[in-house]
Image: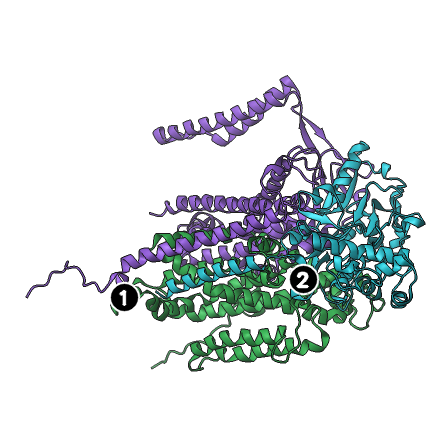
Amino acid sequence: MKMVKTTLAVLTTAAVLGVSSFAQAGATLDAVKKKGFVQCGISDGLPGFSYADAKGNYKGIDVDVCRAVAAAVFGDASKVKFSPLTAKERFTALQSGEVDVLSRNTTWTSSRDSAMGLNFAGVTYYDGQGFLVNKKLGVSSAKELDGATVCIQAGTTTELNLADYFRANGLKYTPITYDTSDESAKSLESSRCDVLTSDQSQLYAQRIKLAAPDDYVVLPEVISKEPLGPAVRQGDEEWFDIVRWSLFAMLNAEELGIDSKNVEEQAKTTKNPDVARLLGAEGEYGKDLKLPKDWAVQIVKQVGNYGEIFERNVGGGSELKIERGLNALWNKGGLQYAPPVR
Amino acid sequence: MQTSVNAPRPRGSVWTDPQIRAWLFQIIAVIAVVSLGWFLFQNTQYNLEKRGIISGFGFLQNSAGFGISQHLIDYNESNSYGRVFVIGLLNTLLVSVIGIVMATILGFLVGIARLSPNWLLSKLATIYIEIFRNIPPLLQIFFWYFAIMLPLPGPRQSVSLGDLFFISNRGLNMPSPDPTGAFWPFAIALVLTIVGIVLMRRWAMARFEATGKTFPILITALAMLVVIPGLTVLIAGNPFAWSVPELKGFNFRGGWVVIPELMALVLALTIYTAAFIAENVRSGIQAVSHGQTEAARSLGLRPGKALRLVIIPQAMRVIIPPLTSQYLNLAKNSSLAAGIGYPDMVSLFAGTVLNQTGQAIETIAITMSVYLAISISISILMNWYNKRIALIER
Amino acid sequence: MTTHTFKPDLPPPTMSVGVLGWLRANLFSNWFNTLLTLLAIYLIWLIVPPLLKWAFIEADWTGTTRADCTSDGACWVFIKQRFSQFMYGFYPAELRWRVDMAAWLAVIGAAPLFIRQMPRKAVYGLGFLVVYPLVAFWLLHGGFLGLEDVPTSRWGGLMLTLVIASVGIAGALPLGILLALGRRSNMPAIRVISVTFIEFWRGVPLITVLFMSSVMLPLFLPEGLSFDKLMRALIGVILFQSAYIAEVVRGGLQAIPKGQYEAAAAMGLGYWRMMGLVILPQALKLVIPGIVNTFIALFKDTSLVIIIGLFDLLNSIKQATTDPAWLGMATEGYVFAALVFWIFCFGMSRYSQHLERKLDTGHKR
């Protein structure tokens, strides 16, 4: 009899849970506001993009994008929690609702945008796939890699690009597919594979992790387009806009010469209508996004403009020392371009 | 005074009748399980639809577009995900089968060594068992791969055996026989010879039973094996062209290669599982009464023969059930391949394919069903074997 | 009259007593044994001296950075420097006393259970099992009753390994007992449900279970209902482990003589009281060694949470070996991990063997 009661109790609980949670269903923004933080999926360790320091604090471009979203929503960039995800689990984690934003050096592709149920909010970093080899091999171009063994990370677009590139050039190769970049780096060092392929930004990051970085070179060929950016679930335009415009705000800020030091002063004293609109001194553009009036001010003040983020995480201010290149603003010869606020 | 034993028991109410209660209870349990399943299914459907995820198994026909380091069947990048699945499955089976065979051999040796009268040997066996069964298999795989395989010399400095076999951190390269035009006559002759040997043996046994005359089965069989296929080689030419590995460019070309990932995985799983099997073997042998050993010895059997003919056959009945679960564990532990980049079922299909297609539910469901099927097959096989040896008991 | 006096015993031949005799009997009794002995000695000579040389004689023990490791042997400095990270993960340093306290409470609380004469052991044991998890949760997680909140994402190292293993086994035990009873039930529907459940979880690898529970569970649940990542991993572990526990308990149930069931039924006990008062207490006592063995297996399996990005002992070590400041310390790291796992597993397996011997006496049929 007791068993019967328990079973009934379980059933009713399940039913109640089902009902109540369907009632809860709503926009991501409401859910985020209710729990008080943004849950953000990042990489499990990639210098420059997202990694934990010895104290467990996360740093990197991808991490800063999430912090910017938190700054826009809550006015507090620290109201974000990070879930380190492997390449394998990232999409499922976003699809299943485990994370609100996936900011994990993820390449924007058509199938991910459509069949996987994701929406890419923009491009944080224009990347391309390259090769890292030991100087000893005497290779100066990827075209000389016929018959090579290639180390690669599982479940990435690099895996596909690699196959395409070798097929297109009539070259043969043997892939060794690892779960994490650390394993592939170790494998390259012990010459289990001749060459490591990945996005170029990652190759530089990998190289500084090697015991003798100077023994390795990055080959000149870039074999693919890898626009990396934050992704959200399909079907919630409101949240999608927030993430997208958090990114654009940082780009616009750089273009307009606003940085984390002068932003508050600019917000008060500016005569430039573009700046005034971005920083909420003019118009109700924050409200349209369902964000506070000073959303962009908070982003730039607490996280920085795009240039600052780049500089501190992957540029001259970091160990990676990557040039701006494609990631310079459009008016400085790069590709980074944000639509205006108006 | 007379009481009928069969008189129906007094009934309080329907609720106290155990039979009705049993029925009721079962019906509730079934309803609970079904509705839980329905509840989960509904949620999944709703969630998938809401997020615009396309579900179904259609993706299996799509072209995969990535390379695989070890494939037992032909494969190129334009093949489908379905074929990738088959490759992953074959790779998993390969590791499991080699691992099971090697772990059984090593396990029996160590188990017997543990009971050896040789003090040093039995202590060594004990130390082996206690060390390796108490360290997680994943750690052992890492150890064999990162600490033993990868530090081997590179392909250009490889250790060669007679310029036929090469050992390097690219694996073990060896010559492979490639069938030529003369292969089919040879293969057919071989099969016919084997059939002939079986028939010959049967005839010889029947004759022995009937007349008591013995026939040199072994020598005749060997002679047949050499002569008949040998004739086809003489007539039709060499059935195989040996392809010898050669260092060209970055890698060895030609021949077969056993990749280091496979070696590390097999080594680790073998050594780990053998420690458990050794313990099973030891307790199985100890379960056979000591009188059996003494009886065998008094019949004049030497220790080795007594072990092989008397003790082990009886011990097998005790050993088989735990051995089965060790085999199952080994098959399941082969999924740890993901840690070192061996393209098994989990890392290839539930990893790469899942991530390229985003079909999490489908790929995981397929993977789990395959493992279930493997487990159930091993169980069935071992139960059948167990029954067969149990029949020997008189 | 002559009395017969025995001559004093001759000493046994020198080759059959003492060191020589022992050697002869145990190592060199015949040519085959001699060969085996020589082989074994060769094997030992091959493995042990280089190992000792690497791990002790040429190892570095003192210092603070990689530069202090100058010799050819192991660099234990790395382990020393990162020791607290291996034990606690990213648990805030100033709050680590809470973890220590939880560990000490477990040791002190469980100690009476190992005292033979302790009265009312079962009651105390049950009480401990109910109270301790609450206290431990309060200490580790906090967030109420005045303790600062430490989210599970900061948990790691050996502490996380122990949490997963013990919560896994504690949660799996009740479910496993129910499943075992279900499997032995004479109601066909219940039996089928239990058998299916058990065989399903026993047939699939833990790695797929963890993956499913860590990333797919939210897809199965109503929108908005979600748990912590660790919690989800634990659910997977509990379901997986309960199937194994069920099989162990079933073994115990089968070992109870039929007379016990009949006697209990004859006394008019219903099913639950018969099980709860008569059968299970006897059966569970029988299967304690089996449960300890399952716990060992689970303890080793926790290393798989690396796959879903939780930082258990192994993953913390792996992470630390990729630190640019400590490159090339992978071997030391793995050896340390192996040692920690080995100490725990070996200790527990010894304990389970001891229990097996102790419990063996009463119930041999």
Q: Position of residue B251 (x, y in %)?
A: 79, 39
Q: Position of residue C124 (x, y in %)?
A: 46, 79
Classify 10 Å Cα crowding around label 1: few (below 14), some (14-19), many (20 and above): some
- Taking depth in this image into account, of B56 and B239 the one nearest to the observer is B56
Query: Does any portion of residue C253 appear in the rendered image?
Result: yes
Vertical comparison of C354 with B5: above or below: below
Residue at the disc numbered 2: A32
Does A275 sit left or right of B181 as displayed? right
Q: Colour of chain B?
A: purple
- Taking depth in this image into account, of C178 and B379 the one nearest to the observer is C178
Q: Chain of mark 2?
A: A
Dot 1: element: helix
For residue A287, which quarter of the picture? bottom right
Dot 2: element: helix
Q: Colour of chain C?
A: green
Residue at the disc numbered 1: C265
Q: Position of residue A65 (x, y in %)?
A: 78, 58
Colouring method of the image: by chain
Does B124 sit left or right of A291 as displayed? left
Kindly report the distance in space between the C-alpha atoms of the residues bearing marks 1 and 2.
57 Å
Residue B372: give its label: none
Residue situated furthest top in the rendering: B235
Vertical comparison of A12 with A339: above or below: below
